[in-house]
Image (cartoon, rainbow, N blue to C red):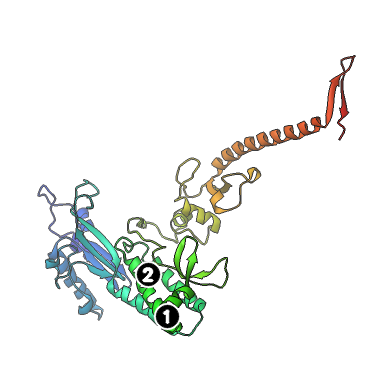
């Protein structure tokens, strides 16, 4: 329906000529997840017409758009939005563009033209409040529990929230640090209550030094490895590292190399190979070429076991079968070289046990050295 309408859009290029139907269809973006969707276009009239078409289509199946969740907004200029607010929320994210200098501005990919603004994808205010409410409920639940129980219940919540926003700009705008500060405020009140109002006693009892960090909320169960609370800041996030899924691929199409490289796991790929594929971003470190489907992939030790290498991920790499043959041939030369030097050393030690001299008949004679 929207594709048919997109073909009729009045869209011209810089020279004033009408664009082809393919360019018109690409100019209109429709993003859907479950019952939430977005319609993106630079022309307000096109977006309004799309809303009318969608409402008519939903009406035919007995449904409709919810007014409280439906709004037309501009990502940069607040005046062009229905409610006077720039940006919009989608799936717990807030997407908005901000005017910046030419040094921080985004650029047009095709022409490298400076756009004068920057797009930021951050956790929405509603999502942040919901996360803090969940943290608060857990802290209140464990008013009289051991510190370890509180940490064990908070860590999965923090890890899950950070993993969800790992492809956002939460770290750039300082939202992760802000979440850590708010959690500290709750834990400080929790500790002061348990120490009869003494904040100093609470700090000494519940916060300690772990590694290079001097201020860690941790339970001293084991002196060697205390149970510590995870922080949002240690996860980090970036909206530019995410690579969009190709439009013509699916997890069910049998492309093991692509999905193992992307996700680090695949039901039909051994876990070790899938993990190495993701670590190497689908590139063979020996020939620097990308892996392709139906190629032989073999796990190799960067430093051979015979040369002292360990069987850990730091010493493992995934390479082509023919690359593995070349690597093995090179390693064997080094192994034989070391074995030869080692044998020479053993032979010299044996020779050093004897005194050698030539007799009158020019015969080499040896006598064992006296201890």
- 115 in relation to 148, above or below: above
Judging depth in this view, the residue of 138 and 14 nearest the camera is 138
Callout 1 environment at 10 Å: few (<14), some (14 to 19), or many (20+)?
few
Query: Is residue 3 something that shows in the picture?
Result: no
The N terminus - image quarter:
bottom left
Residue tagged by mark 1? 198
Residue 109 spot, x, y in % from top left: 25, 49
Q: Residue furthest top?
A: 361
Residue 63 marker: none
The answer to which of 96 and 177 lies nearer the viewer is 177
Q: Residue at x 76, y 35 (%)?
A: 346
Which of discs 1 and 2 lies nearer the camera? The answer is: 1
Task: Identify residue for label 2.
Answer: 180
> At 61% from the left edge and 39% from the top edge, which residue is drawn?
331
Q: CA distance from mark 1 to mark 2?
A: 22 Å
Screen quadrant of the C terminus: top right
Mark 1 or mark 2: whose residue is earlier in sequence = 2
* Marker count (numbered): 2
| Residue 47, x across and y down, in percent | 17, 66
């Amino acid at each position: 329906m929207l594709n048919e309408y997109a073909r009729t859009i009045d869209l011209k290029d810089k020279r004033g000529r009408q664009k082809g139907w393919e360019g018109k269809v690409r100019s209109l973006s429709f993003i859907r997840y479950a019952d939430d969707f977005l319609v993106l276009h630079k022309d307000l009239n096109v977006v309004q017409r799309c809303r009318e078409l969608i409402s008519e289509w939903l009406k035919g199946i007995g449904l409709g758009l919810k007014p409280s969740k439906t709004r037309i907004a501009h990502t940069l200029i607040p005046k062009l939005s229905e409610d006077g607010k720039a940006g919009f929320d989608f799936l717990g994210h807030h997407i908005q563009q901000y005017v910046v200098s030419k040094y921080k501005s985004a650029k047009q990919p095709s022409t490298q033209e400076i756009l004068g603004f920057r797009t930021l994808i951050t956790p929405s205010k509603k999502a942040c409040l919901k996360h803090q409410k969940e943290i608060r409920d857990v802290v209140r639940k464990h008013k009289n529990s051991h510190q370890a129980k509180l940490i064990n219940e908070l860590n999965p919540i923090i890890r899950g929230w950070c993993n969800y926003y790992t492809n956002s700009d939460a770290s750039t705008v300082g939202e992760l640090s802000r979440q850590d500060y708010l959690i500290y405020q709750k834990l400080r009140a929790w500790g002061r209550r348990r120490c009869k109002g003494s904040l100093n006693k609470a700090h000494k009892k519940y916060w300690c030094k772990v590694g290079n960090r001097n201020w860690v909320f941790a339970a001293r169960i084991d002196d060697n490895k205390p149970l510590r609370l995870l922080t949002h800041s240690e996860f980090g996030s970036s909206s530019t590292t995410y690579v969009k899924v190709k439009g013509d691929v699916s997890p069910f199409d049998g492309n093991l190399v692509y999905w193992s490289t992307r996700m680090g796991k695949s039901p039909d790929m051994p876990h070790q190979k899938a993990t190495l594929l993701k670590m190497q971003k689908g590139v063979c470190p020996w020939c620097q070429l990308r892996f392709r489907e139906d190629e032989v992939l073999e796990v190799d030790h960067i430093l051979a076991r015979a040369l002292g290498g360990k069987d850990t991920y730091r010493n493992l790499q995934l390479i082509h079968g023919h690359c593995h043959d070349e690597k093995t041939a090179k390693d064997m030369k080094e192994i034989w070289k070391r074995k030869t030097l080692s044998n020479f050393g053993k032979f010299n030690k044996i020779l050093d046990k004897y005194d050698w001299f030539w007799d009158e008949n020019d015969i080499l004679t040896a006598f064992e050295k006296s201890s």
